[in-house]
Amino acid sequence: MTGGRAWLNEALRKVEADANRSADTHLHVFPLPPSWGVELYLKDESVHPTGSLKHRLARSLFLYSLCNGWIGEGTTVIEASSGSTAVSEAYFARLLGLPFVAVMPRSTSPEKIALIEFYGGRCHFVDDGATIYAEARRLAAECDGHYLDQFTYAERATDWRGNNNIAESIFEQLALEPHPVPEWVVVGAGTGGTSATIGRYVRYRRLDTRVCVVDPENSAFAPSYASGDPSVTTDRSSRIEGIGRQRVEPSFIPTVVDEVLAVPDAASVAAARWCSEITGRLVGGSTGTALWGALHKVAQLRATGRTGSVVTLICDGGERYADTYFNDDWLSAQGIDPTPYAAALDAFLTTGTL
């Protein structure tokens, strides 16, 4: 590692300059019947320079590693990732002139692989998704590089008290809305960093907002939360890229989460497609998972005669999933049938129930 403090100062300037160039993401109103007295908002994280919520995480991880002295001039940066985080990290590595290697399952979507390579990253594939952590550590040791380890550091690399994190941004954008303090914020969990940031923020600000984590099939978060056992694992990888893990990641903080809702993969796909049709914005599978959970919260408010607001995220764009969630042949091969969930969604704006 070379360069010293002068290189570090310039690296930090470049990362901070990227943040200054990137305007905050939009908070869209999802169209619900006005008579309900319930507002649903979508925080559009797909408009970041690298197209997903993970741009925030990647920036935070690089700043954290730079300031800890773990990354210097010429350091090879390595990550274990199923896609979007690696895309964003490859972008920041290129910004700093550093080599980047993403360790990922061979099943990662071709669109994400192409984006990592577009930003100058190299993809290192494994057949068993559970081995990505050990393989990333091995590669880092082999080349004297740095393993960013999003799954450990996501919850601590972001300043959850403010500093323009996603929670602070949401509440500032809601300030003039009919219900500026939402009843629920609904997010997925991959690392657990986003739910930790929002859960800590609402407690720090003494807000009554509750946090719901939505979890796809084959993920450990929901069964672990229900049982209170952090050692729960699953024997298959999540089919909803970006969220769901076979183990409970160190950055997932269950004590700042108010509910974990398991969502069928077919419901996630149906909701992603439905959201794309309703809003005109093509969204990915993890957004579908989050929207399905948010609509459940809207339905609960309706069932109890309450008004209020619910917020969730557009995690990334659907263009990355043309060969998967928007491909009927792929869905059929996976045994995923979104048809019954699509029918329920089509009726939702009339019935208010799911």
Image: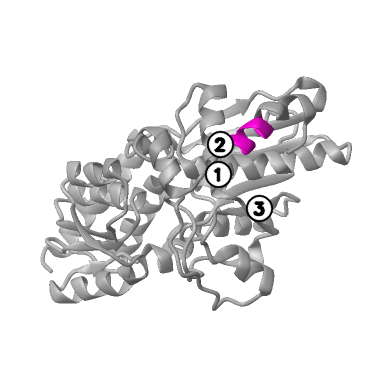
Asked whether residue 300 is in view, the answer is: yes
Q: Residues within 10 Å of mark 3 (few under 14, many from 20)?
A: many
Residue 342 higher or lower than 81, as above or below = above
Who is closer to the viewer here, 115 or 8? 115
Q: Quadrant of residue 268?
A: top right
Tag 2 residue: 270
What residue appears at the point 27 percent right and 44 percent down from the top-left corner?
110
Residue position for label 1: 266
Residue 212, disc: 3
Whole-number angstrom distance, CA of label 1 to CA of label 3: 20 Å
Where are the magenta residues, as a range? Answer: 339-345
Main SS, magenta region, reads: helix
Q: Along the horizontal axis of the image, is 107 left or right of 303?
A: left
Q: Which mark is residue 154?
A: none
Q: Residue at x 73, y 51 (%)?
A: 207
Helix, strand or loop at mark 3: strand
> Tag 2's secondary structure?
helix
| Image quarter in which the N terminus is found | bottom left
Q: Amino acid at mark 3?
A: Cys
Magenta span contains residue 288: no
Residue 219 position within the rendered picture, expressed as x and y whole percent measured from the top left: 52, 62
